[in-house]
Structures are given as C-alpha cells and as structure tokens.
Amino acid sequence: MTTASASRLEPHLAAALAEDAPPAGSPAWRVDLAAAARERLLADGLPTRRDEDHLYTDVRPLGPLLARRAGPARRAGPMPADRLHLSPFAPEAVLVNGRLDLAASRMDAWLARHGGAWLGRITSLADAPVGRALSTRGGGWAALNDARFVDGLGVRLPAGHKTAGPLVVVHTTAPDGIDRNAAAFPRLYVEAGEGAEALLVEIHLADEEGPDLVDAATEIELAPGARLVHLRLQLQHGASRHVATTAARLSRDSTYRLVDVTFGGATHRHEIHADLLEAGADLDLSGLYVLRDTDHADTHVTVDHRVAHGTSRQVVKGILDDRARGAFTGRVLVHPDAQQTSGRQAHHALLLSEGARVDTRPQLEIYADDVQCAHGATVGQLDEEALGYLQSRAIGRERARALLVHAFAHEVVQAIGHEALAQDVHRLLAERLEGAHFEDAPGEGPAS
C-alpha cells in the first residue's frame, strides 16, 4: 500500500467526513465501520495515479463531487427495469441515490416466494459481517463507501435455499432538488448459506439529471457449497462517473460466477476482489466493456488463492470505438499453501477505430510450485477474412461487422447461463453499437 497523508483528500471531503456520521439509531456495527473507514481515509487518502494500481484512471475530476452526499429522491417516469425491458423480470429492490425505495420495490412479494430468506435494509442486519470483505481487500473508494453510505440492501439466503428465478436489484440516481455536484453511495450485501444457490442481477443506471458520481460497494459471502451467479450490468450516460468495488469471500467448494458488463461512462472504474479461502473454491469471472466517444473504463481484478485446490478463471473483453479508453489489470496471487491451484486469465480487446486505445497489465504472483497458472492478452481489429466470408454470403459489410462484434462478445454474454438475460444483453449491445464507425483500426491482429 502506498503511504499517504490527509493532504491527499480533497479539503472539502475531509470536512464532509467529519459531519457524515451514520444517522441516529444506526446499529453499533454501522457506527464502528464508518469510524474505522474515516480513520483509514484520513491516514491514506484516496488513490491517485501515483499509485501503481491506479495508473490508468485520473480521479482528479471527481474531487469537486465528493463534498456533498446526494440526498433522498424519487424517480419520475417509468422504472429503470421497464426502460431496459429486461425480459419479464421486475426489480425486487430499487435503490435511488443509495437509499432503498420501498414504494418502487417488491420485496414482500419476493419474500413470500422464498420462505426462510431475508431481504431488507442493510442496517437491519444485527449479526452479519458487513464490511469484512471490503475492509480486508478494498481500497480507498471502498473505504469512502464504508464511511458515507446511509442505506443499502441486505440479502441472506439460508442453507440449502434455491431462489426461483433471478433476484433483480436496481441502483439508480435521480435529482435531489439541489444540484448534480454530489455523490451517491449504494451498498449491497449478499450472504449465501451452505449449499444455497441464487442468480443475482445487479443493475446500475445513471439519470442525466441526478448526481454525477456514484461510489458503489457490493459484498458477497459464500458458505461451503454455496453457488452464486451474479450479473452486474452498468449503464451510464456520457457524463456520468462511476467507481465500484465488488468483494467476494469463497468458502469450501463454493462457486462464484460474476458476469460484469459495462456500457459507457465518462469515468468507470471497477475493482473486483476475490478471496478463495478454503479448498474447492471456484471463481469464474467474465467481463465485457463497450465504450465509444470519450468513454473510459478501468477494470482491476485481484484474486487471492490462499489454500490448495482452488480454481479461478478470468475472461475480460473490451469493444472500443471513437476515442474511448479501456484498461485491464488482473492480478492472481497464489500463496505458499495454495498447492494444486489452477488460475487462468485472459483479456481481449477489439478496436473499432484508430483513436481507441486499451492498456493491459496481467500479473501472476506465485509462491507455490505445484500450480497451473497462465495469462494471455490480445488487442486487434475485426478479422477481414471472416468479413469477406460473410459478404460472400450476401451479407452487407456493416451487418457483417456487427455480427462479428456480437460473436466476439458471445463468450462473455453466454456465461450468464440464463438465455433470456443473455438475449437482453445482446440487445443492449446492439443498441450501443448503433452508429459505430467500424474503422479498420491498427492492432496486433484479429481479436478473439
């Protein structure tokens, strides 16, 4: 960790931290979590590009947005899921500016279908280890969420519970009647008991009139044998800024499959941390970012193999047009006791224009000798031979290029394992590609 000082905090943020205490009546764990986070922030500050792990994202434009926490708000017009047309699924929980909107949620109906499960305000959790996954692995932005979130959603699945269909959680923003120079701090905590299984759909949307910055945090705690499929879908407008941390702790024989899909945003950074704590833990991470104009997306993954017989796979793909910028850093750490570990990592980027750029930084840090670990990366353009073949089948050139882009993304989208949701993501990709330039961009060869 880079040593820093309080001078690295925006001056107005330091004052805000002193005033942003948890609301009266908050449980003791919430008060303690906020106090510890404030101490970390005052000691270490927020990360900058001087930090090795933040080389590719300039957070200085976020400074003016940090002083004010976005206030309560209600959305006007159709609900986000209605606008997205996400199959037949309505959101079970909606959070606006980081606060649970009970009127827009359907938690009672979900609970009626899932006896024994719990879904509600995160501050109603009395004995859950909220903050544990983030405090051990999260960075400055996670600490900022620890210090400043006022509400959030908690999910607890008992041992052996299997959800009926996806659990849809929507985080969105809306005007709070003051101005857009503010930040929202959504929080999600998911705990799956032994042998429990669930499909979680977490959607992040930005309203063009809402706060300009979102600092989101999601924690996943998996008991032995639990299995969670987690689709995280992030859709932002061109001026929005989104930083997020997802941290997961995997126990014996548990499986965590994360499909992380990002569509745009002026600044987007997602830190993903996974701790494989016991034998048989299995992580499967698939990522897709689709950028155009001057969008910027930075994905930073850290996987800790702490014991033997763990498995991790990472496949992250980027599609970039115009002058968009993408970055991927993937770190796999294999501890001395983690013999017979399998860790694989791949990043592939498809450049649709000459002005698009991507940075890739794979990192394998191995302290055990009986392992199978590998990484790979490609940056390229559409395959001209494949284009020629499709055109020979009477498919127009622009249509052929769109088909190849969808084929490039297909591996990630199908990892969702739910056909209707996969079709939704392909439809969103098609909408995002409308107007793509499809220039013959330079690269190292066709991306795969």
Image (cartoon, rainbow, N blue to C red):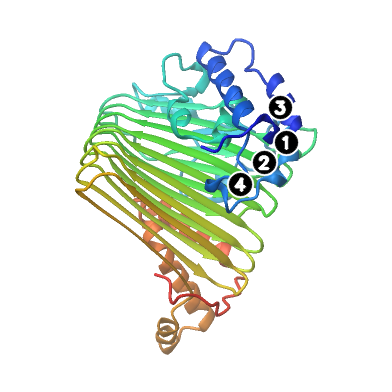
Q: Which mark is residue 32?
A: none
Q: Is residue 433 above or below residue 306?
A: below
Question: What amino acid does circle 3 point to?
Answer: Ala
Residue occupied by mark 3: 14
Specify whether residue 33 is in view. yes
Q: Residue 43 appears at what percent x and percent y?
A: 61, 27
Q: Position of residue 412 (x, y in %)?
A: 39, 57
Q: Is residue 144 left or right of residue 202?
A: right
Mark 2 residue type: Leu
Residue 99 visible (yes or no): no
The answer to which of marks 4 and 3 sits earlier in the sequence is 3
Q: Earlier in the sequence, mark 1 or mark 2?
A: 1
In space, the residues marked 3 and 1 are separated at their CA atoms by: 15 Å
Q: Nearer the viewer, mark 3 or mark 2?
A: 3
Give whichever of 174, 142 is nearer the camera: 142
Q: Secondary structure at mark 2?
A: strand
Q: Where does label 2 land, which residue?
A: 213
Q: Amino acid at mark 4?
A: Arg
Does label 3 or label 1 sit earlier along the sequence? 3
Q: Amino acid at mark 1?
A: Ala
Q: Distance from label 2 to label 4 (Cα)?
A: 22 Å
User: Could you tell me how far apart the alpha carbons at marks 1 and 4 are, in whole angstroms?
Assistant: 25 Å
* Disc 3 crowd, CA 10 A, few/some/many (<14, 14-19, 20+): some
Q: Earlier in the sequence, mark 1 or mark 4?
A: 4
The answer to which of marks 2 and 4 sits earlier in the sequence is 4
Q: Are the residues tagged 1 and 2 within 8 Å (C-beta)? A: yes
Q: Residues within 10 Å of mark 1 (few under 14, many from 20)?
A: many
**Disc 4 target residue:** 50
